[in-house]
Image (cartoon, rainbow, N blue to C red):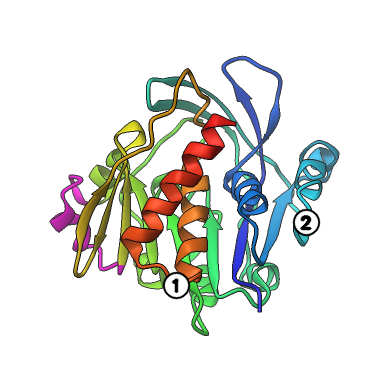
Amino acid sequence: MTSIAALGNLTRDVVAGALPRPGGAVFYSAKALARIGGEAVVAAACAEADRAQLVPPLEQLGLPLRWYRSETTTAYTFHYEGDRRIMLQDAVGDPWTPERALEGAADAQWVHVGALVRTDFPEETLAALGADGRRLLVDAQGLVRTAALGPLHTDGDIGSVLRHVAILKLNDEEAETLVGSASPDRLRSLGVAEVLLTLGSQGAIVISDDVVERVPAEEIAGPVDPTGAGDTFSVGYLVSRAQGAHPVEAARAATRTVAEFLAG
């Protein structure tokens, strides 16, 4: 049985004025899964016009891959100011239907839902994915971001989608959007069994019913491009959890995976 599935829309990214490059949560998740090893499948979508640029880098990773046609390819322009990413949302891809998501996930029991905006995975799709014992890890960025073009707009109007989520990864800004602060007690009020609060170079905090523990980041020498680090953390965490690690142990393993990713 396949352990992990990574699903999501590919993106066409322009970073700090450079040439467009492939991106998106599913892209960086797949790169991390290929590096870590293990049983995994990938399902990704983009427009036909961008397939030749965006899909071959995924194919080269050697993981089982399903590609789906989208009317539009998600596109971003961004740069970094310290740990903060300043982004423009130039285009938004199509929503994933329950049928597409279930086909893409195959028989995986742990699913990284690579949502980039709120419309990528509607609640009915998350409900279908979360059935039959599957455990979903969702990044809060894909819940709080609206589909509006231009500067990213976020709000906490996410409805009841979290009832389908087993693991929620979010940063301090997303925590403030959802519950007003990054306080562990406030984050517990979301009702998600496992919450991963990532703090960039300051590490992460694991929050569950019985533990609140900080996991420090690994030190990395020299400047790095942190694009994809969050998705790498998510995948590293899922792989460890699928292998039986408890949440704090899995977060430590994910932190090491991120350091290896950033170090090249």
The one of 54 and 220 positioned closer to us in this rendering: 220
Mark 1 in CB contact with mark 2 (< 8 angstroms): no
The one of 221 and 224 positioned closer to us in this rendering: 221
Q: Determine if the magenta segment contains residue 189.
A: yes
User: What amino acid is labelled 1 in the image?
Assistant: Gly
Range shown magenta? 179-193
Up-down relation of residue 25 to residue 130 (above or below): above
User: Which of the two labelled residues, at mark 1 and mark 2, occupies the earlier sequence position?
Assistant: 2
Where the N terminus falls, by quadrant? Answer: bottom right
Give the tally of numbered discs. 2
Q: Which residue is mark 1?
A: 244
Where the C terminus falls, by quadrant? Answer: top right
Say if residue 146 shows up in the picture.
Answer: no
Q: Which residue is mark 2?
A: 67
Name the secondary structure under disc 1: loop
Say if residue 114 shows up in the picture.
Answer: yes
> What is the quadrant of residue 21 in the picture?
top right
The one of 101 and 240 positioned closer to us in this rendering: 240
Are there few (<14), some (14-19), or many (20+) residues within 10 Å of tag 1?
A: few
Up-down relation of residue 19 to residue 236 (above or below): above
Up-down relation of residue 160 to residue 21 (above or below): below
Q: Determine if the magenta segment contains residue 13.
A: no
Q: Looking at the picture, how far across and down is residue 162, in whole percent?
A: 36, 66
The one of 192 and 123 positioned closer to us in this rendering: 192
Question: What residue do we see at 19% from left, 57% from top?
Answer: 212
Question: What residue do we see at 64% from left, 49% from top?
Answer: 35
* Main secondary structure of the magenta stretch: loop
Name the secondary structure under disc 2: strand
